[in-house]
Image (tube, rainbow, N blue to C red):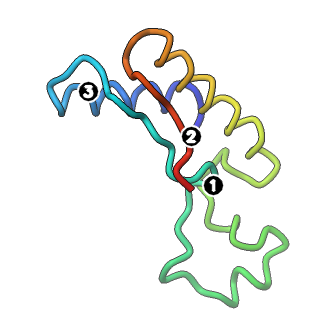
Amino acid sequence: HGYEPTLQCLNKSLKRLQTDYLDLYLIHWPGPAYNTMSRRKDRMEQSPDGPFVYAKSGHASKDMQSLRAETWRAMEDSLYDGKCRAIGVSN
């Protein structure tokens, strides 16, 4: 998440797909970049951060609002730049 990582991911996808634009660019879930699958439930329950104990650096609970806004702004800029024709959230 964040402005630059979002643009980097889009550009990487465009290159891999060998195209100049996407018809639809979706963010799956505008939440933290962590996966609680196969994680210790007791560690999440004991941590004051809950599942955010597994979040990537810079993706703490307190940072989510700004990260989501930066990500969405990058998606809007991609739309205005013609790199995608529509954007959205799929979840």
Q: Which residue is mark 1?
A: 32
Mark number displayed over residue 20: none
Amino acid type, residue under disc 1 in the picture: Pro
Q: Position of residue 18 (x, y in %)?
A: 14, 25
Which corner quadrant holds the N terminus? top right
Residue at 64% x, 53% y is 31
Q: Position of residue 20 (x, y in %)?
A: 24, 17
Depicted 60 relative to depicted 12: above or below: below
Which corner quadrant holds the C terminus? bottom right
Amino acid type, residue under disc 3 in the picture: Leu
Q: Earlier in the sequence, mark 2 or mark 1?
A: 2
Mark number displayed over residue 14: 3
Question: Rounded to the nearest whole Å, what is the CA distance between mark 1 and mark 3?
Answer: 24 Å
Q: Which of 7/23 is in front?
A: 23
Question: Rounded to the nearest whole Å, what is the CA distance between mark 3 and mark 2?
Answer: 18 Å
Amino acid type, residue under disc 2 in the picture: His
Counting every numbered tag in the picture gives 3
Task: Categorize mark 3 by other alpha carbons within 10 Å: few (<14), some (14-19), many (20+).
Answer: some
Residue at 69% x, 90% y is 42
Task: Categorize mark 2 by other alpha carbons within 10 Å: few (<14), some (14-19), many (20+).
Answer: many
Q: Which residue is mark 2?
A: 1
Question: Rounded to the nearest whole Å, what is the CA distance between mark 2 and mark 1?
Answer: 8 Å
Q: Are marks 2 and 1 in contact (CB under 8 Å)?
A: yes
Task: Categorize mark 1 by other alpha carbons within 10 Å: few (<14), some (14-19), many (20+).
Answer: many
Q: Earlier in the sequence, mark 3 or mark 2?
A: 2
Q: Position of residue 52 (x, y in %)?
A: 70, 64
Residue at 42% x, 34% y is 25
- Give the SS element for disc 3: helix
Q: Quadrant of residue 32?
A: bottom right
